[in-house]
Amino acid sequence: MTTVLKTKELQKQFGSLTAVDRVSLEFDDDEITSIIGPNGAGKTTFYNLLTGVLQPTDGKIWLQKNGDLKDITTLEPHEVAQAGLSRSYQITNIFEGLTVRENVRVARISHDNSRMDFRSRADSDDEMERDIDDILALTNLEEMAEVPCDELSHGEKRTVEIALALSIEPNVFLLDEPTAGMNPTETTKIVSLIQQLNRDVDSTFVVTEHNMDFVTDISDRIVVLAEGAVLADGVPEKVLNDERVTKAYLGSEST
Amino acid sequence: MSSDTEGISDRVTAFGYQAVSEGWTRQRVSILVALGLVLLAFGPSFQVYLFTEFLIIALFALAFNLLYGYTGLLSFGHGLFFAGGSYGFAIVLRDLGPVITDTVGSALGPLITIGVGAIVGVALVLVIAIPVGWLSVRLEEIYFALITLAFGMLGFSVIIQNPAGITNGTDGILVLLGTIELAGMEIRLGDRQVYYFFTLAIVATSTYAIWRIVTSPFGVVCKAIRESPDRAKALGIDVTHHRWMTFIISAIFVAVAGVLMAGLANVASPYQSHWSTSAIPVVATVIGGATFFAGPIAGAFVYLYVRWGISRFPALEAHWELFFGALLIAVVLYFKAGAVGGILVLRDRLRKTMGNKTETDSETGGENR
Amino acid sequence: MILTNLVPLIGIADIIVGLSLGSRLFLIAVGLSLIFGVLGVLNFAHGGLYMLGAYFALAVTTSIVDNFWIAVVVGALAVGFVGVLIEVSTIRPLYERAESDLDQLIVTFGFVLILHEAVRFIWGSQPYSMDPPAVFDFSVQIGSQFNAYRLFVIVMAFFVMVGLWLFVNKTYFGSLVRGTSSDREMASMLGVDVSRLYTGVFFLGAFLAGLGGALSAPLQSMSPALGDQVIIDAFIVVVIGGLGSMSGAFVGAMFIGLLQSIGPQFIAAGHIAIPFLAMVLVLLFKPEGLFGGIGE
């Protein structure tokens, strides 16, 4: 068990509001961690700090690359992605005007470092096309490969969301409420997809969620955030029976 | 149908057969177009001029759309590069032309001068576009439009000031292409037919180059950036850098159009850098349909030929501005697919009514989704 | 020290001229700024609206009643209504669209063409002029000469500035404007009829542009090219002063106005380029403008 992602005393202030409060966490490979907490607990801000979208007011972030822990605190979002940290968004953020296949292709082009190639045809690299096929197969998106994403259902779009994040072959996978806005059928599909990915893909998963069934089903470990700080951290049975956790949730609504 | 061992003549024959036997296929249309392009050269002199101008504006708009339709950045200052190409070209012809002709001889001198002029025009624009682009792509949307507008007008005001006597202020610089001798024949380079073929060759090559670029991995990344810059960043794409590169490539092709324009209009004028010139590719592209590769071409056609058409009727008193203003608004509000979109819709309807299913042309037919 | 050396070279008359140029720029720029600050629309056609104000005022004095004051008021109101027409018919349908900023810019550019052509069609291309109101139509001599009407224009601009400030900061409608500009969704959830508010702001912006045009009519010759000439200056002012800031529009406008009247005497070459250079620098280093923020 090696540490793949680590934060130390990570802090984010917006004026007088402390959104993320001295969060120190270590994530190990082969572990699925769920981050839960009431709305406004700072989960998305935490993700934004990790991925370089926001700069922390204080604290540091390390990501494992080639066996070493690299300090990624000040990196730009695209550099963080290149270092091996990928994310999916809570509010679906995919390339709506492009087809599913093209979406994945963009990610593969970035991964293969061929974005400055303006001489070959984008779809002429057989090896890349095979990689895309693999990803589409893995995420069960083969049937809608040629469909423009703005014509997909919400659940299908959220699946593309995950496929995109997957396509850059990250070390660590941050999923931000993957089941957001989904009906039960779609939720079940996504849950089994994530479980399957965890088996098939060599990445570490960190998931924020409100859906408790999902959390208890798949997590090896649960971290609870409340008001920006870590409230509890441990195996599901322990954390979910912790009084402070239930109090934090009763204080505000949970889904 | 054709194997690798078949010769060119066999392939052309096969092409011809296909064209003739299968009705309105791609092949038939392209033969007609090629024929038309050649025949045009023998039409009325003014029409040749107008069509040459259309080709140049089409290139201008295509290059503009690389930045707008494909990458999502609206520049209101592309005239800067148009002027850059023209002035680079014009200055070489004026100042270096005599030197080159003295060195190389008057038979081929003018031709070499044009070559050098073109290279200098493009190089000048490259030198300008690199820093201007680097600075501009740091801004988004409206602010990008404003800063490109400012740079364009900055160029205009600098040119008008006639720094070091180079640009000749508001009068611009006269461009005379000269005459060469080739295989015993005297060819006047400024002759409309000659210049038409010359422009056709360059614009066709440039168009092909732009097509290759938009269908390459580079182009796919451009589209992704247009759709969601944040998502692109999260996938490891340095969006700012990519926009910068696209800006530079766009500027280069605009420079080519500028060089061609100087030769056609026989003048490099400061108004080429004015925002009113920068607005031309915007109008052409929007009307033609920014979401299609051929959109800017169709829009340039509409822009030039409707203007010309309206000017033929004194009763309309050249009300082309009113017409285009209204057209622009109508397209943006109701029909963003523009002229090309309209043509495709018509074609599909025609196909349905004729029950013609010989082609497997997808609905998107070149749409840069 | 530098100032005392310059003063003999800059006549008071030049300053007055510069300030009056700045005043008319202020009237266009503040409307443009207001519309951008609240609606997020950069109205390319604002110069055209200014031009309409001048022509409408002229039309009133020549065809309806030869009273300057009535002409100005009627002209400005008429332009306000033209603004409403533009907003309701072409800009309102675009609010709901994502990525609507650039679409709106293109639509307003369409109106640049339409207004230019409309003016040319109705009044022709020849330049017109209008006399200042008799009560102010006399020359003042301080150093060199200038028309006293210019002083009136400067004073008017000042009153408009104060009036606007009071309006935005002290009235109910003004508070709606301030609130909505920072958060449109919030405002509509609070029950504000955002559509009507937007139309109202557009009316105000257009009215101000028309007022500027009508008031400036005696100071310049009118031609269909007026709108185009003025919109670029307005953009410069608004960028430098801050998109959405009224005091920024005031300071920026005076700066550009003075630059136009005094500049040519000092910087023979390049005085045209300076405003654009300033625009580039502000956009790069302080895009929200030197003053930034609405109501300030």
Image (cartoon, coloured by chain):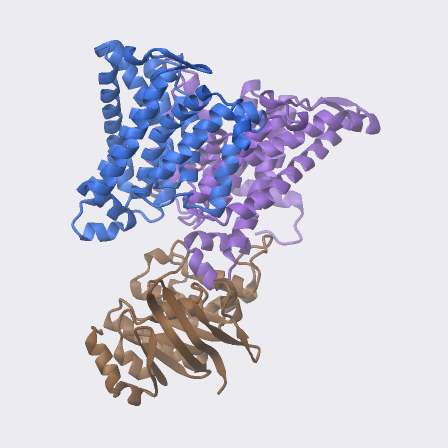
Chain colours: A brown, B purple, C blue
Please provide percent x and percent y for residue C197. 21, 41
Please provide percent x and percent y for residue A236. 31, 86
Quadrant of the rendered structure where residue B228 is? bottom left
Question: Which residue sits furthest left?
Answer: C191
- Looking at the image, residue A93 lies above or below residue C263: below
Q: C63 or A99: which is nearer to us?
A: C63
Please provide percent x and percent y for residue C127. 40, 13
What's the residue at 35%, 10% (across, down)? C138
Question: Residue B214: in sight, yes or no?
Answer: yes
- Looking at the image, residue C174 lies above or below residue A242: above
What's the residue at 22%, 82% (across, down)? A246
Please give the count of numbered marks on the rendered protein.
0
What's the residue at 52%, 35% (across, down)? B152
Please provide percent x and percent y for residue B103. 83, 29
Question: Residue B259: in sight, yes or no?
Answer: no
Q: B328 or A62: which is nearer to us?
A: A62
Quadrant of the rendered structure where residue B231 is? bottom left
Quadrant of the rendered structure where residue A125 is? bottom right
Q: C17 or B170: which is nearer to us?
A: C17
Relative side of A189 to B141, left or right:
left
Q: A107 or A35: which is nearer to us?
A: A35
Relative side of C69 to A198, left or right:
left
